[in-house]
Image (spheres, rainbow, N blue to C red):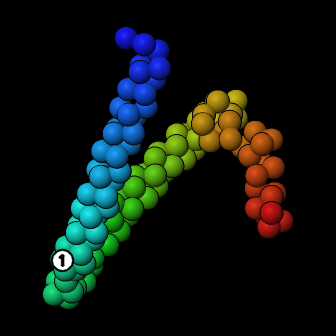
Amino acid sequence: MEINKLSSQVSNQIDSAKAAEGGNAASKADAVRTSDTNSADKVSLSGAAGNAKTDEQFAKIELDKLNQSSFDKLRSYKAKMQEFEAAKKVSSEAAAQTEIGKMLNDPKVWEKIAEGIQGK
């Protein structure tokens, strides 16, 4: 086979591949247009009134979760305070070793409190 014929065969193959890809692109574009039309037909507002009840139930469940979480945090802090109070009755050194005692002696905690008071 000659080099001149080889290069022309390669260019013919490339041209035919491009033509095939162009045809596929057109059919893909048609498929997208068809699916867009079908999805527009599927939109319905018939269940909108039922969604309000579902949203309300969802909101109540989420509120219950938040309430439970808050009460768990409060119980935890109450237990820490009781531990601190009991240690304070023993000695001030024992109170300083509790979690609340460590927080009271931490300068970073006092800085955060001061920032909160100043409104930063």
Quarter location, residue 12: top left
Q: Is residue 83 above or below residue 52?
A: above
> Residue flagged by tag 1: what amino acid is it?
Lys
**Looking at this view, is 89 or 85 the one in front?**
85
Q: Is residue 53 above or below residue 95?
A: below
Residue 93 image position (x, y, % from top left): 70, 30
Assign a secondary structure to mark 1.
loop
Residue 72 image position (x, y, % from top left): 40, 52
Q: Please report the residue visible at 43 percent of the width from the left and 27 percent of the height from the top.
A: 8
Q: Quadrant of the N terminus?
A: top left
Residue identifier under label 1 = 42
Q: Quadrant of the C terminus?
A: bottom right
- Indicate left or right for 90 with 3 as reference: right
Quarter location, residue 113: bottom right
Q: Is residue 91 visible?
A: no
**Is the residue marked by circle 1 packed among few (<14), some (14-19), or many (20+) residues within 10 Å?**
few
Residue 39 image position (x, y, % from top left): 23, 72
